[in-house]
Amino acid sequence: MQTQLLDGTWSLSSVDPSAIVNNCSYFSNINRIDINIPGDVHSTLLDRGFIKDPYYASDELSTLWVGQNDWKIERDFTYKKSEKKVILSLTRVDTFACIILNGKEIANTDNFFARWNIDVTDVINDGENHIEFIFTSAEKVAISRNAELKYPIPCSLYPNGSPNRNLVRKPQCNAGWDWGPCVMSMGIYDPVKLIGVNEVFVKSWNCIPKLIDHNWICKAEITANVFEESDVDFNIHLAGRDEHTIVHVKPGKEYYSFTFCIPEEDVELWYPAGQGGQHLYPMYISFADFSDKRMVAFRTLEIKNNITMGGKELTVCVNGKDIFMKGVNWIPMDALYSRITTSRYIKLLQSVTDANMNMVRIWGGGFYENETFYDTCDRLGILIWHDLMFACSTYPSEEWFLKSVEKELKYQILRLKSHPSIALWCGNNEDLGALTWYEESIKNRDRYVMDYDRLNEGVCGRLVRELDPSRVFWPSSPCAGPGDFSDNWHNDGSGDMHFWTVWHEGASFDKYRSVKPRFCSEFGYQSFPSLSTVKSYCPEEQLNLTSPIMEHHQKNPRGNSIILENFSRYFRFPNSLEKMLYLSQAQQAWAMQIACEYWRTLRPYCMGTLIWQLNDNWPVASWSAIEYSGKWKLLMYHAKNFFAPITPIGYIEDGKLKVFITNDTDKAEDVKVSVKFSTYRGEKVRQHVFRVTVEPQSVLEVTSSELDDIDVTNTFAYLKASTQNIYRESVIFLTEPKKCALEDPQLKTQIRKVGKGFQIEVSCSRPAFWVSLDANSIKGQFSDNMFSIRPTAQKVVTFTPESDDITLEEFEKNLSIYDLYWAGY
Ligand code: BMA
């Protein structure tokens, strides 16, 4: 078997230059430019200066024409025939391409998520060849499909959004979302492969060890196209085992398997982050002239959905251990595919475990991710809640659509199922709820429920059960469970919930404590990016929250007002852009702290909290915890603390301060907990010390103390929890911060260069709250941020820059320090 990649420089031209002459006359006279494949059309035109940067100012609008027109990508290449068969294998062709090889039309792609294996044996020359991909604008296809529909198939449309996105199998968020730009991309994002084979073309192989009676049953499964009847060698190596067999293959029989077993004690288990090691074993196989390697793990997985505590739980259980899921929702990392890189994947996912998280949800409006994503989650122990790619919409159930979905799922499920990190398959994002969002589906519900079920159960559920019986098919997020159509935005007793009452319904933060979800898979609060990021897309003269450009980088229509309205609910109003940007991030972090901490105290009733959203796909105001540049917002630093395995939690309820300790480890912990009250001048008011033992994988209520004699505007509380190895603090305002008599903390910093990084000692003369450091344009990471300190103890933080050549002067010049007093008093 030989594989030749056709990566490199291809040429790009317009299919109809007259249609784009007003936008770009260069392509008239059939001019072409170079394009790197894998790559996308927008990035190529941007690099060559034919379009403005869609991420700057409101230039997104001036680039919409690219996605509304047709483009051609082509190249010459030489091929040396040495096998009986030649397969052109393609993935992530975006989206509608007519493929012509040596003047002959060989395929028409129509699904971004599918794989195309095209037998070109009789078309390819032994020598010189020419291949063309003629892309039709997906927007055009969507509009024409809409015109042909027997009845409307509505979907949610966001600012500047591309219409009818639900009628094309393409990442739905390419059409624009309430955090993302409309970039109706085109291109080829994976290597273009020419695979020479003889009798057999292997399409997929998998092995998911299953534990039965203290033995791991390892079934190696192969799917293949067989061109000639023959006997082929099948070799397997795994965990010190070498297995060999001869398999008789014949045309038409696609599936082959071989089972062997490994005693339980011979291998180490794979655990999610924070629960044990992530032991992975290289598995090698060869089948006829195909050979490959992948990492395999030994772990048991169960998604419990039993009736417990008056509802239906949703508990992730790995190796027999119920684990509280702490995590985030993942969206595609960039709207320009050429900017998606391995190093960004690793950095973003490393951030997840650095912030004490153990789960990410691949959200249904994006795409099935690159191998790097899954390999990294396997390696770091990040479990994946994997949506199938449908979001916020109704979808057709016509044959052509269902067949196309079937093709994509057969490829994706068999491509991915061996990854130990994938915890479950979920049918879609919010499509169950979407049935109640549109006039048409409200008026004629049965018709749309039928469509929904034909797709979601008839195709998605069926294929998951068929192709990957080792995992649960969770019908939709949110939902109360298989077969249950109730609204899980407001019902909290069963399954997973999306809680948007705080944010989309504008409720106050205490409402997070008005629900008891079994598993909250979406909730979020927006903030603005930091000043250095805002300056990357907004010119000086428009640095104002309600300027056209700042509003262009807010895709949630009520977004800015909700952030500002909540400032007035809780804080003294900030009087500069810089203060508003800081306070929006502190406010977001605080909101998520309130939600996550309360739901952690409900364990084991609640067994999961996934924050909306981890990342941004361009620079924007959004619910993200990490900015487009990869810079952690204050939320990510705060999450590292409120998701810590052992941490103190305190909140006010019915005039009492309730205090808890969590323990997400396997060991009972003896914890000293002190509950202290201090004035904003720093004078001690009162304190209580408790010595408690917190059982493994549990949470303990330590105390519930009356506050009736406390002046809540002049006093705050802080909790300290210490064991032999850990020390954690948490500060609690006893009323809205705006009512509190904060005093100027007169923050002082001492900065020293330490190796390639910097050490910052922060001290204060009055209690200081939510002290935040920002290195502005210097990329790097602080060891902690958004911390509160008292005059009695200084805080030492380190900063690790991404590049090693930052001088102390440069760092000092770039370093900003903020705190709550500065922001509003
Ligand atoms: C949920 C998500 C996304 C959306 C987010 C914020 O609906 O599923 O579709 O971006 O809320 O509005």
Image: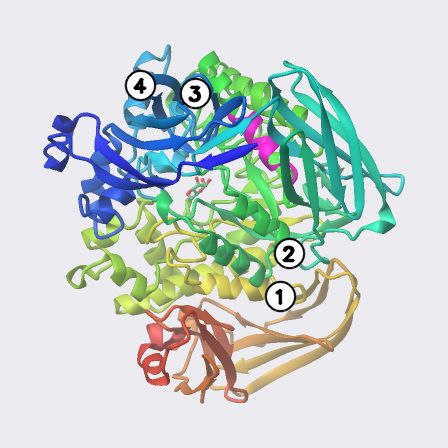
- The mark nearer the N terminus, 3 or 2, is 3
Dot 4: what SS?
loop
The mark closer to the camera, 3 or 4, is 4
- The mark nearer the N terminus, 1 or 3, is 3
Characterize the local packing of mark 3: few (<14), some (14-19) or many (20 or more) Cα atoms within 10 angstroms: some
Q: Is residue 161 magenta?
A: no
Alpha-carbon span between mark 3 and mark 2: 37 Å
Dot 3: what SS?
helix
Q: Is residue 569 left or right of residue 480?
A: left
Q: Is residue 416 magenta?
A: yes
Quadrant including the C terminus: bottom left
- The mark nearer the N terminus, 1 or 4, is 4
Would you name the residue on which mark 2 appears? 600
Dominant secondary structure, magenta: helix
Q: Are marks 1 and 4 in contact (CB under 8 Å)?
A: no
Quadrant including the N terminus: top right
Characterize the local packing of mark 1: few (<14), some (14-19) or many (20 or more) Cα atoms within 10 angstroms: many
**Of the numbered discs in the image, which one, if any, rests on residue 33?**
none
Q: Is residue 664 above or below residue 259?
A: below
Q: Is residue 331 above or below residue 462?
A: below
Q: Identify the amino acid type marked 4.
A: Gly
Give the residues drawn in magenta, as a range. 408-419
Residue 131, picture quadrant: top left
Q: Are marks 2 and 1 in contact (CB under 8 Å)?
A: yes
